[in-house]
Image (cartoon, grey):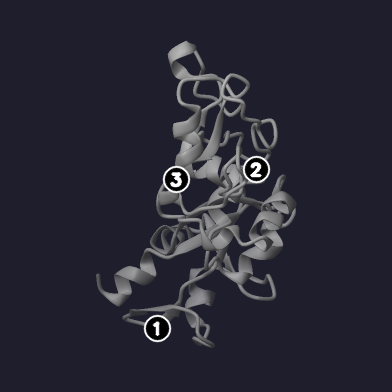
């Protein structure tokens, strides 16, 4: 993949007219939104720029750029939708990564923390006995505890859950955004989202080093 292709594949945070994070897109899509005046780029001072004024800015710092017939253009970190002022009502997908993230990459039986390859999913009420694939019935488990529990319930296996599993409060955009190497420019827009403090606590505890943002979409 060429450098230009890599830069155009970079993630860009999309915020609504009220500066609330609503989506994450690629730089390629962000430039299309800017060129069609659907969105404008935000600089470090949160000043909005249409495509022409953004193209006129001189590249600075270590930020990524792409080459064009006009010369190099900065890849925006954040774009603001011109007219959209709502928050999308999308629910967080029940995925392996999101369960691991909710549980802090920690086995919910023995409290051992591990990498995605070292962990598994466990149905509290086994699937063989009608246990559903739901936020309230699936937890992160190490392979040893998963094998020990087998097709039994925790009480039957003489095992105890660290905490009762529940649906996270995070929005999908927050689950994707909290990933290793996320741009610092995103932070002010993520802090106000539901669940941001909870995810930040996990990150401060070292979960960020274990997460793999490319494994699954939120």
Q: Is residue 193 left or right of residue 41?
A: right
Q: Which of 160 and 215 is in front in this view?
A: 160
Residues at discs 3 and 2 in contact (Cβ within 8 Å):
no
Point out residue 218 in the picture as x, y percentages from the top left corner.
Answer: 50, 43
* Mark carried by residue 56: none
Q: Is residue 69 above or below residue 94?
A: below
Answer few, some or many: residues within 10 Å of disc 1's Cα (few below 14, many 20 plus, some between 14 and 19). some
Point out residue 209 in the picture as x, y percentages from the top left corner.
Answer: 53, 63
Answer few, some or many: residues within 10 Å of disc 2's Cα (few below 14, many 20 plus, some between 14 and 19). some
Residue hosting label 1: 72
Q: Is residue 20 left or right of residue 41?
A: right
Q: Residue at x 43, y 14 (%)?
A: 128
Residue hosting label 2: 170
Instruction: Locate the N terminus and report the quarter of the image it occupies.
Output: bottom left
* Mark carried by residue 217: 3
Q: Distance between the residues labelled 1 and 3?
A: 31 Å
Q: Which of 17 and 53 is in front in this view?
A: 17
Residue 66 position by quadrant: bottom left
């Amino acid at each position: 993949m060429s450098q230009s292709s890599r830069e155009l594949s970079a993630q860009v945070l999309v915020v609504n007219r009220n500066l609330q994070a609503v989506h994450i897109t690629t730089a390629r899509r962000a430039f299309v939104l800017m060129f069609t005046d659907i969105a404008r780029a935000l600089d470090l001072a949160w000043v909005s720029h249409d495509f022409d004024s953004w193209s006129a800015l001189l590249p600075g710092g270590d930020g990524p750029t792409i080459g064009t017939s006009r010369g190099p253009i900065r890849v925006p970190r954040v774009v603001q939708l011109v007219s959209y002022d709502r928050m999308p009502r999308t629910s967080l997908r029940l995925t392996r990564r999101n369960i691991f993230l909710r549980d802090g990459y920690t086995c919910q039986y023995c409290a051992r923390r591990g990498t995605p390859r070292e962990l598994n999913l466990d149905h509290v009420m086994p699937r063989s006995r009608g246990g559903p694939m739901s936020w309230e019935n699936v937890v992160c488990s190490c392979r040893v505890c998963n094998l020990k529990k087998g097709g039994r319930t925790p009480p039957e296996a003489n095992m105890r859950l660290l905490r009762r599993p529940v649906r996270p409060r995070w929005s999908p955009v927050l689950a994707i955004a909290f990933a290793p190497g996320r741009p610092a420019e995103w932070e002010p827009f993520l802090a106000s989202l539901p669940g941001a403090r909870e995810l930040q606590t996990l990150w401060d505890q070292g979960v960020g080093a274990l997460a793999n943002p490319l494994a699954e979409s939120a």
